[in-house]
Amino acid sequence: MKKLMTRWNIEKPWQLAVIFFVFSITGSSSIAVGRPLLRSIGITLDNLSPFIYYPLFIFLSFIFYQLFLVAFGWLFGQFNFFWNMEKKLLSRFGITI
């Protein structure tokens, strides 16, 4: 735990607990929103090949994950941590903010 706190530059153990909680609800929420959104625009496994549906679903869930990560991070008082994480991730894709 100490090693992770040092790596992420976190001062208090409760911050680590909040960060883990944000990660968990973000993952669940992105999937809970992605699948119904696809269904609402008429994209299902019944009318689309799994080879197209699943990459589309994963991509959409990834987009929602990134948005929810910053939003939930802000909601739980850890915006700076998650915003810095987002900037690092986007820089790996060649996007600078």
Image: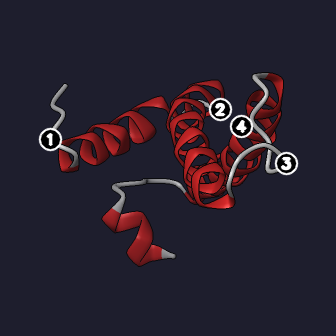
Q: Looking at the picture, which amino acid does disc 1 mark?
A: Gly
Distance between mark 1 and mark 3 Cα atoms: 36 Å
According to the picture, the residue beneath numbered tag 4 turns out to be 34
Residue at image x 53%, y 29%? 67
Q: Tag 2: Cα neighbours inside 10 Å, few (<14), some, or many (≥20)?
A: some
Q: Tag 3: Cα neighbours inside 10 Å, few (<14), some, or many (≥20)?
A: few
Disc on the earlier residue, 4 or 2: 4
Residue at image x 65%, y 50%? 53
Q: Looking at the picture, which amino acid does disc 3 mark?
A: Asp
**Disc assigned to residue 76:** 2
> Is 54 or 93 nearer to us in this picture?
54
Q: Looking at the picture, which amino acid does disc 4 mark?
A: Gly
* Marks 4,3: beta carbons within 8 A: no
Disc on the earlier residue, 1 or 3: 3
According to the picture, the residue beneath numbered tag 1 turns out to be 94
Disc on the earlier residue, 1 or 4: 4
